[in-house]
Image (cartoon, helix red, strand yellow):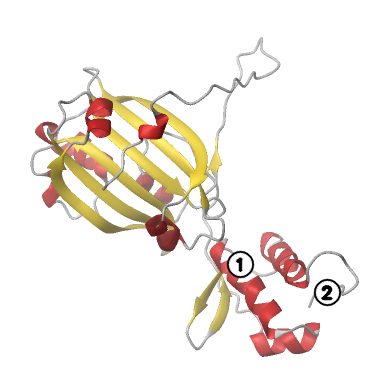
Amino acid sequence: MFEVDKDSPLPLYQQIKEHIRELVDGGVWHQGTRLPSERELIARLGVSRITVRQALRDLVAEGYLASAAGKGFFVAARPGPQELHALVSHTAAMTADDVVPSSRVLDCSVMAASAAVARKLRLPVGAEVVHLARVRLGDGVPLTVQRVWLPHHLVPGLAETDFSRASLFEQLRGRFGLRLVKADTTVSARLADPEEAGELDLGDPPIGLSVDQLTFDEEGRVVELSRSLHHPWRLPIRILQDLPPQESAVTVVARPAPADSADAPRTD
């Protein structure tokens, strides 16, 4: 069992968090391990209930721990970093990492395209689009809130699909014969809106990893506009790149956001 240093400038709850993180990351406490009760932690560490609860609450928000009413806290299942393969579905990515994927559907309907959505999808304002909003989970843990817009004329009947189980990319390829060949993806950080913060149990400030994407088919049509917010600790993003043999370094160029970035699509 770890100890805390009451003479350290690091707050006691932060010390508790760091010790628990080390035990989990080091494999000492593995998935499903039940933590000592709050009463045991208070007695062993000589700290207040408020201190222990703040540390445990933060670790639940970060995805390290899960809680069950009447049973205490357990080490949570945590998927590893998700490689940024823009044309691979969440379902396929999770399955490849031996994580059980699932979704909770927030909305799946046909609506009129706003000016921002229409511009991105290259449609007239007011054209019919399918809007799909889901919470994406791995082993039951909320990882991402994703909102997607698609031209309705390319995917008639899509809104009747049960997306609590179905993969959108599999539907596009198998059901509608759309060959997805290109994606334009932007990764940034932003504050979550209240719905996103609640669904992902984000802390304060509620900052997440934003992944915005346009997906194109072989005819050059924009098939999908997606706007996702990843929990930054539960589902970090990993980018792998192989260098050509003659290269010895990677140059990363930071570019300012497009002028219309403030006009990002919303569901309201």
* Location of residue 21 (image quadrant): bottom right
Q: Nearer the viewer, residue 29 or 62?
A: 62
Question: Which residue is depicted at the point 41% across and 33% down?
Answer: 262
Residue 95 can be seen, yes or no: yes
| Disc number placed over residue 147 in the picture, else none | none
Which residue position holds label 2? 4
Which residue position holds label 1? 58
Give above or below for 161 relative to 76.
above
Question: Which residue is depicted at the point 16% across and 29% down?
Answer: 125
Q: Nearer the viewer, residue 114 or 171?
A: 114
Q: Nearer the viewer, residue 186 or 104?
A: 186
Task: Please name the amino acid that badge 2 sits on.
Answer: Val
Give above or below for 31 relative to 229.
below
Where residue 28 sits in the image (x, y, percent)? 71, 68
Horizontal arrangement in the rendering, residue 170 relative to residue 64 (left or right): left
Where residue 205 sits in the image (x, y, percent)? 56, 56
